[in-house]
Image (cartoon, rainbow, N blue to C red):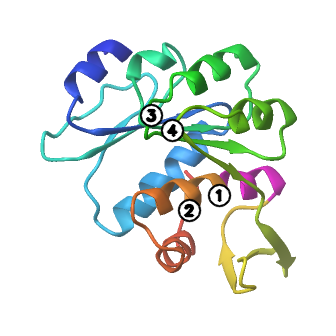
Amino acid sequence: MTATELYNQSLDKQRIIIVGEGGTLITSLIAHVLNFYKRKFDLSLPGQEPNLNPDHAVIIIHGVSQLTDYKHHIAILSTIGSNQNSNDFEVLADATPKGGTLLYPESNSTLKQIGSRERTDVQSIGYGRYKYETKDGKTILISSTNEKFPISLSGDQNMEYLSAAKELLKKIGISSGQFYKAIAVYQPA
């Protein structure tokens, strides 16, 4: 299904697009948390036909091409992949509609410049990298309130992707406490 066809079949849904090298993990984290709380959503992954349900109000799209054709409401920018360039991300960011939201990594100077540029009536949210520690070979996530949660992910880049997922989920009604509870049982594929 092309991006335009997906858009035409999801006109009544909130369209959330995730782009960049971290898109696969961020999408997986978001889907895990939504499934954990039995929230209804549609999912569009590269190379797979999406299963669209007219009763679902949200669609999560892992976008790799034709990015602006999805006509997103919320976009998450992650690491620029080897087959992408910053112009693709800038065009996508500029296509964020009034009332839309754009999330970008604060650690990447190019994406921070793209994401933080003022756009009329678009909310730009920078996401950072979670603090974490390793004890006995286990990764312990440290929240902004210094609570600790054991998780199955490790490494700085994954902590940034985890932060991106949390910021997006906050926008669609998942609290911090709910997020941490669900992420504690996440297992990467």
Q: CA distance from mark 3 to mark 1?
A: 26 Å
Nearer the viewer's eye, disc 3 or disc 1? 3
Residue at the image position 43 percent from the left and 53 percent from the top: 31
Q: CA distance from mark 4 to mark 1?
A: 26 Å
In the image, taking residue 141 as reference, residue 54 lies left or right, namely left
In the image, taking residue 176 as reference, residue 59 lies left or right, namely left
Residue 48, quarter of the rendered image:
top left
Q: CA distance from mark 3 to mark 4?
A: 5 Å
Q: Nearer the viewer, residue 179 or 12?
A: 12
Residue at the image position 84 percent from the left and 46 percent from the top: 107
Task: Work out whether mark 3 precedes mark 1 in sequence or the reverse, and give the earlier one.
Answer: 3
Magenta segment: 155-162
Q: Position of residue 58 (x, y in %)?
A: 30, 45
Task: Work out whether mark 3 precedes mark 2 in sequence or the reverse, and give the earlier one.
Answer: 3
The reply to whether dot 4 and dot 1 touch (C-beta < 8 Å) is no
Would residue 91 be seen by someone viewing this image from the given angle? yes
| Helix, strand or loop status at disc 2 | loop
Would residue 83 be seen by someone viewing this image from the given angle? no
The reply to whether dot 3 and dot 4 touch (C-beta < 8 Å) is yes
| Helix, strand or loop status at disc 4 | loop
Q: CA distance from mark 4 to mark 2?
A: 37 Å
Residue ID for mark 1: 162
How would you rate the neighbour count of disc 3 (Cα within 10 Å): few for under 14, some for 14-19, many for 20 or more?
few
Q: Position of residue 64 (x, y in %)?
A: 54, 21
Residue ID for mark 2: 187
Say which mark, if any, is on residue 121.
4
Residue at the far left: name it. 54
Question: Residue flagged by tag 1: what amino acid is it?
Answer: Leu
Is residue 63 shown in magenta?
no
Task: Work out whether mark 1 precedes mark 2 in sequence or the reverse, and give the earlier one.
Answer: 1
Question: Residue flagged by tag 2: what amino acid is it?
Answer: Gln
